[in-house]
Amino acid sequence: MDQNLEQVQFTTAMAPPRVPLFQFYPHLLLLLFLSFVLIMQTVTPLPVHKAPRLSLHNKDALLISRSRPGGAISANALLDFKTYFYRQTLDHFNYAPQSYATFRQRYVVNSKYWGGQSFNNSPIFAYLGAEAPIDNDLSVVGFLNDNAPSFNSLIVFIEHRYYGKSIPFGTMEEAMKNETTRGYFNSAQAIADYAAILSHIKHQFSAHDSPIIVVGGSYGGMLASWFRLKYPHIALGALASSAPILYFDNITPQNGYYSIVTKDFKEVSDNCYKTIRRSWAEIDRVASKPNGLDILSQRFKTCSKLNNAEELKDYLETIYAVAAQYNRPPNYPVTMVCRGIDGVHNGSDGDVIGRIFAGVVSYKGNKTCYDMNTYNYPSETSIGWQWQTCSEMVMPIGRGQNETMFPAAPFNLDEFIKICSEIYGVPPRPHWITTYYGGHDIKLALNRFGSNIIFSNGLRDPYSSGGVLEDLSESVVAVTTRNGSHCLDILQATKTDPEWLIMQRNTELQIIQGWLTTYYADLKSLNK
């Protein structure tokens, strides 16, 4: 067996039950607490930038997906995966002695449908992990599994460095403890990791001439598109689902994200939209009373008393953003929220506060209490993504006065740089993404330079505002659906999927088949 490789059998458990982070990361939690204090200190003079999570799924969406018939890959199907660990180079871009350190990087392979080298050089479908462990992706990302039988493809899932079981320096606490250890945590190193592992896999499976199609969603979709641009000799093509590669360096208007959230709610119900828009001032009005926070705590059945109105408003803003971003059939979370808001009429519960709370109950379910911090607890993903956004992934998402159904919260780059510098000791590099990968004048740049990239977007996804929504060339193409949401096309197909979603996936598959047909013809011509 190759010295860079360790193999373990993948089981349906995928990972042991997660132990609470505070048992292992006391210093890290202190860092997060100090970060929170720094951020809260700026709330009064200036709203602080809080970018919505860039994930293929979140906890709410995951529960909804798994509740759909066939919405998750079966436990038996997961038994076909085998887990390997590759001895990865810590720093691909430096020849200093410390750069040669290595860490164990996890990737998972399913060879059940693999036609192999002897069967017309069957393709390799590789999913590029993003800002989370790959465990949940294995159970809900169905695009590779669903289509492997018809393509006779090898399936590969690769975990992003610094997440899951692919953390350098042993633990997340050790990896994030100072400027030096965090310095190896960036997107360029991540896609270089993928290049090394995919080259290794081709060697291990004797698949020298097998073409690779990389797939990713959200941040992973960005990585997939950038991988094709940086490593065209390794990946024949890329499917970049819901990849907002234009939400950098002010290419996209700040309010793009929240404008689509607002549009999603308004299209479902004008009354729902107007109620939400009025609610912020009403919450502030009630909170300003001598016992106002007690009243709000009671009305919203909070698990602990509100310390300020911002806690409640932050909770509600996140619910609305998550509902819009993951507005998937058949439940359609935006409709769930508005059904609750619109379902309250006259009487004591007919006021704005009562309607807003009814929307929470409709979306979250009837609970004994509602935890206002449910979206704020530190996790491996929030810890890692906070660093990534405070270093290179600077997405200027904000909103001005009366631009959306939300209160004004403009993005202020100077304040953002100040806060990130105080937390991490180094300032962000807000222009690096467009410098390294491009973005400005993208159609002019990629019309001749780029090829074989699908940018897929659902136009109800708020992040589609920063996505590529028109064809850039004959082979760098946009596939959009009016009713689609975040990364919906690469999730597990189900019998209840609407016709427009089936058509979107079929269009993507036809494009990929075209790439493969051309590649095989070129390969045959060269081998004559």
Image (spheres, rainbow, N blue to C red):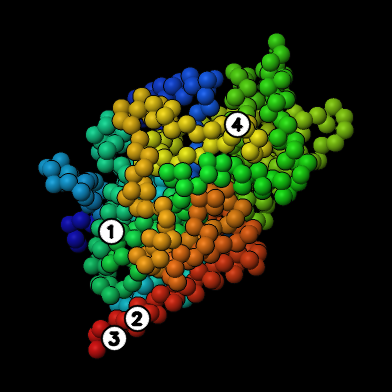
Q: How many marks?
A: 4
Q: Quadrant of the C terminus?
A: bottom left
Residue 375 % position (x, y)? 54, 34
Compare residues 47 and 527 and report the one nearer the observer: 47
Question: Which numbered mark, 4 or 2, is in the foreground of this view?
Answer: 4
Which residue corresponds to the image point at 44% horizontal and 68% vertical from the top-left?
Answer: 473
| Residue lying at 70% horizontally and 42% vertically, measured from the top left | 337
Q: From the image, tell me which residue sits under label 1.
A: 195
Q: Gap in Å between the C-alphas at discs 4 and 2? A: 54 Å
Q: Amino acid at mark 3?
A: Ser
* Few, some or many residues within 10 Å of mark 4 (<14, 14–19, 20+): some
Mark 1 residue type: Ala
Residues under labels 4 and 1: Cα distance?
42 Å
Q: Which residue is mark 3?
A: 525
Badge 1 element: helix
User: Is residue 214 in view?
Assistant: no
The reply to whether discs 4 and 1 touch (Cβ–Cβ < 8 Å) is no
Mark sitting on residue 520: 2
Q: Is residue 441 above or below residue 271?
A: below
As helix, strand or loop, the secondary structure at mark 3 comes to helix
Is 495 situated above or below 3?
below
Query: Which is nearer the eye, 397 or 51?
Result: 397
